């Protein structure tokens, strides 16, 4: 596993629960984000144009968001 020099903790990439994907097509990006979210990933976009995208497996965050949405009137 790799980590930044001086950091004691490993990144989500190091633990195998995150992936970065580069897409230039905004439609494909939206579709991919929806698929990843259905499977428990969150999406963190880097930069204004979102060319670099970070998907991280966080089923507890996605589950909590779904629960909160279902409780709204």
Image (cartoon, rainbow, N blue to C red):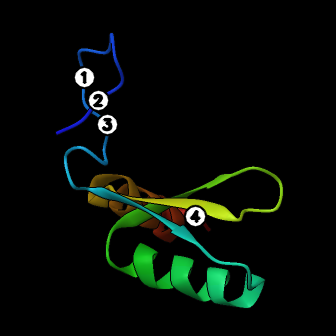
Separation (CA) of disc 1 from disc 3: 7 Å
Residue bearing mark 2 = 3
Quadrant containing the N terminus is top left
Residue bearing mark 4 = 72
Residue 38 position in % (x across, y down):
39, 80
The residue sitting at 32% across, 55% down in the picture is 58
- Mark 3 nearby-residue class (10 Å; few <14, some 14–19, many ≥20): some
Q: Is residue 70 above or below residue 32?
A: above
Residue bearing mark 1 = 9
Quadrant containing the C terminus is bottom right
Separation (CA) of disc 4 from disc 2: 40 Å
Residue bearing mark 3 = 11
Q: Classify mark 2: helix, strand or loop.
A: loop
Q: Are marks 3 and 2 in contact (CB under 8 Å)?
A: yes
Q: Are marks 1 and 4 in contact (CB under 8 Å)?
A: no
Q: Which mark is residue 30?
A: none
């Amino acid at each position: 596993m790799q980590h930044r020099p001086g950091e004691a903790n490993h990144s989500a990439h190091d633990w195998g629960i995150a992936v970065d994907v580069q897409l230039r097509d905004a439609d494909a990006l939206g579709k991919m984000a929806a698929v990843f979210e259905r499977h428990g990933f969150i999406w963190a976009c880097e930069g204004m144009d979102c060319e670099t995208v970070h998907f991280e497996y966080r089923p507890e965050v996605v589950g909590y968001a779904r629960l909160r949405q279902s409780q709204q009137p």
